[in-house]
Image: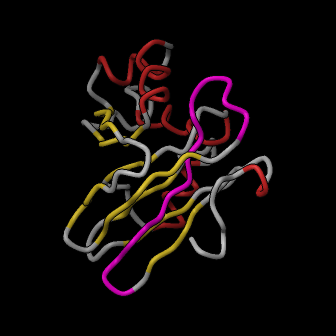
């Protein structure tokens, strides 16, 4: 399982919510201000369960998702209950469309080839004031991807 914590000036962004999300939060030092998901494989989103009323009882944590991932969460329990109870607030992403999370941080999702049984799979270009990073937790074959990793 891969996940990434991105620290802004005063807030934490978590990319992927693994089943070890409590440990992710402990290691990061704070609750995430937002969560961004890469895809619907069990090791990448099931940590959302910790935001439910049985554990944290979170209040509208922004969760950024691609279209198929959004439908997956909305149409399948127990994830749909997190939405119904306002534990999470789904925010839509689009392929190759940059979103500005705050004045220090912007993120651009891009589709990567991977087993897409339940949702599309994306990586992210993360851009801060002084640094940028590429996060691709899963990809089947680099030569199938229509981009050059070096150029990215």
- Labels in figure, total: 0
Q: Toward which corner of the image does residue 100 lie, by quadrant?
A: bottom left
How far across and down, in percent of the image, does residue 53 sit? 37, 26
Q: Residue at x 51, y 73 (%)?
A: 133
Kindly report the secondary structure that dominates the magenta region of the rendered protein.
Answer: loop
Which residues make up the magenta segment? Answer: 114-130
Q: Residue furthest front?
A: 146
Q: Is residue 93 magenta?
A: no
Along the line of sight, the residue nearer the viewer: 51 or 84: 84
Residue 114 position in % (x across, y down): 71, 40
Relative to residue 122, is residue 128 drawn left or right?
left
Q: Measured along the vertical axis of the image, is residue 12 above or below residue 67?
A: below
Magenta-span inclusion, residue 118: yes
- The residue positioned 47% from the left and 64% from the top of the image is 125
Q: Residue at x 54, y 66 (%)?
A: 27
Image quarter hosting the C terminus: bottom right
Of residue 94 and residue 40, the one placed in the foreground of this image is 94
As displayed, is residue 67 above or below residue 20? above
Query: Toward which corner of the image does residue 95 lie, by quadrant?
Result: top left
Residue 124 location, x and y as percent? 50, 58
Q: Residue at the location (63% across, 60% down)?
A: 147
Image coordinates for residue 37, horizontal then vertical, percent: 49, 44
In the orientation shown, which residue stands out farthest toward the left? 103
Q: Which residue occupies the foreground of this view, 90 or 32?
A: 90
| Residue 13 placement, left or right of 141 | left
Compare residues 101 and 115 and report the one nearer the observer: 115
């Amino acid at each position: 399982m891969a996940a990434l914590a991105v620290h802004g000036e005063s807030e934490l962004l978590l990319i992927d919510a693994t089943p070890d999300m409590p440990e992710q939060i402990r290691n990061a030092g704070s609750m995430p201000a937002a969560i961004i998901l890469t895809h619907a494989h069990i090791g990448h989103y099931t940590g959302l369960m910790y935001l439910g009323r049985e554990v944290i009882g979170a209040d509208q944590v922004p969760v950024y998702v691609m279209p198929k991932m959004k439908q997956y969460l909305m149409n399948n329990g127990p994830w749909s209950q997190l939405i119904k109870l306002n534990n999470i607030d789904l925010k839509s992403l689009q392929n190759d469309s940059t979103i500005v999370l705050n004045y220090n941080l912007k993120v651009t999702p891009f589709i990567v080839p991977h087993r897409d049984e339940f949702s599309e799979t994306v990586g992210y270009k993360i851009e801060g004031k002084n640094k940028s990073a590429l996060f691709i937790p899963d990809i089947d074959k680099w030569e199938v991807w229509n981009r050059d990793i070096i150029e990215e």
